[in-house]
Amino acid sequence: MTPEGPATPKHTGPPQGALLVPAAQLSPPPTLSLKLLGPPSVSFEGEPVRLSPGATTLCAYLALAPPEGRPRSVAAAHLFEDCSERLARRRLNTALWRLRCEVRAGTGLEIVGCDSWRTVALSPDVGVATDATRFQGLVESVLRIPPADLDEADLARLHSALSLRRGRLVETCDDSWVMTARCRIDTLHLAALDHLIQYYGVRRDVPAITAYGERALELEPLREDLYRHLIRAYGTAGRLDLAERQFEHCRAVLLEELGVGPMPETVATYARLHTASSSRSRAVATLITEFERARRGIGLLATAMDRALDQLRGMS
């Protein structure tokens, strides 16, 4: 009897040398779009997703959280700060259940991660794109560049970022959890406007300086660095009248709101501009005087030459 050899295993895997592609890489995950700069709203594949106000706020909260989420105890305290810890946790569970149901009904997606009962986060299987994240990325990429060195692509990024802002971050909610993120976005918004003021000052574009200056001062009417940049921008553009008007406006606002005058730095900025203007005026006046003296001298010389020519003609 011939002894049987070891059984040959059946080959059930992919052919040898075949490229293994993880299932997650075969297609991008479905993406929800959240507009948070202004009244929050959610859309999926271009269509709005109808959510209750509470579910919309919770969705915004989760979208603004770190990728790993937040501890449930922290989330409960943030969202239901007027409740006891036990009641807050119960209300958080109810709110998460309602968010799951409403998003599932509108999109078929499971938006809330379920890996841990200790943390709460968005599901990693669903992509979430927010206008706030895009706004922050666009502005931060440009603020590293001095205003005078911006190119057309940088300028387009700033304009694109400003077009995203329909209002303040999650403006329907004033709970403490949103304030830090809102302050960060507001600071970036003001910095973008300030960058544009300085950019258009170098290019002597007075209408643009005025437009972005008004928007910036509407947000922060007591920021003296904005006034200094506006004064300098108008001065560079040759509009000393507007620079003086901006300085006087700064002084009036500070006196009315705070009872103080402008800082020494602001006064010095205006004084340097005024001194430079006076120096240029004196230099121009000196040149005019010298040219007028030269013109009179040339006139006297021409008269003497005409007289000499007449004498020469009389002698011929």
Image (cartoon, helix red, strand yellow):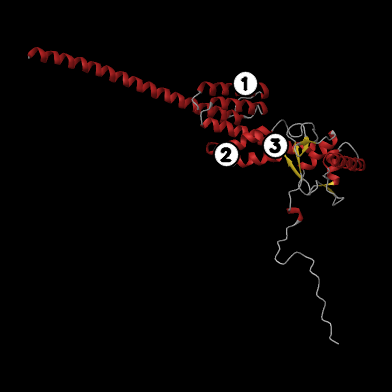
Mark 3 and mark 1: span between their CA atoms?
29 Å
Residue where numbered disc 1 is placed: 252
Compare marks 2 and 3 and give the one earlier in the sequence.
2
Amino acid type shown at disc 3: Ile
Identify the residue at the far front of this view: 1
Q: Where is the C terminus found, in terms of image quarters? A: top left
Q: Mark 3 against mark 1, which lies toward the viewer?
A: 3
Circle 3 residues within 10 Å: few <14, some 14–19, many ≥20:
many
Indicate which disc residue 153 carries.
2
Vertical relation: 280 (above or below) 130: above
Q: Nearer the viewer, residue 283 or 254?
A: 283
- Tell me the element at label 3: helix
The image shows residue 53 at horizontal and vertical percentages of 84, 33
- Tell me the element at label 2: helix
Amino acid type shown at disc 2: Ala
Indicate which disc residue 185 carries.
3
Compare marks 2 and 1 and give the one earlier in the sequence.
2
Amino acid type shown at disc 1: Ala
Q: Mark 2 against mark 3, which lies toward the viewer?
A: 2
Vertical relation: 238 (above or below) 87: above
The image shows residue 149 at horizontal and vertical percentages of 53, 39
- Answer yes or no: do the residues labelled 3 and 1 have beta carbons within 8 Å? no
Identify the residue at the far left of this view: 316
Circle 1 residues within 10 Å: few <14, some 14–19, many ≥20:
some
The image shows residue 195 at horizontal and vertical percentages of 59, 34
Q: Nearer the viewer, residue 198 or 142?
A: 142
- Tell me the element at label 1: helix
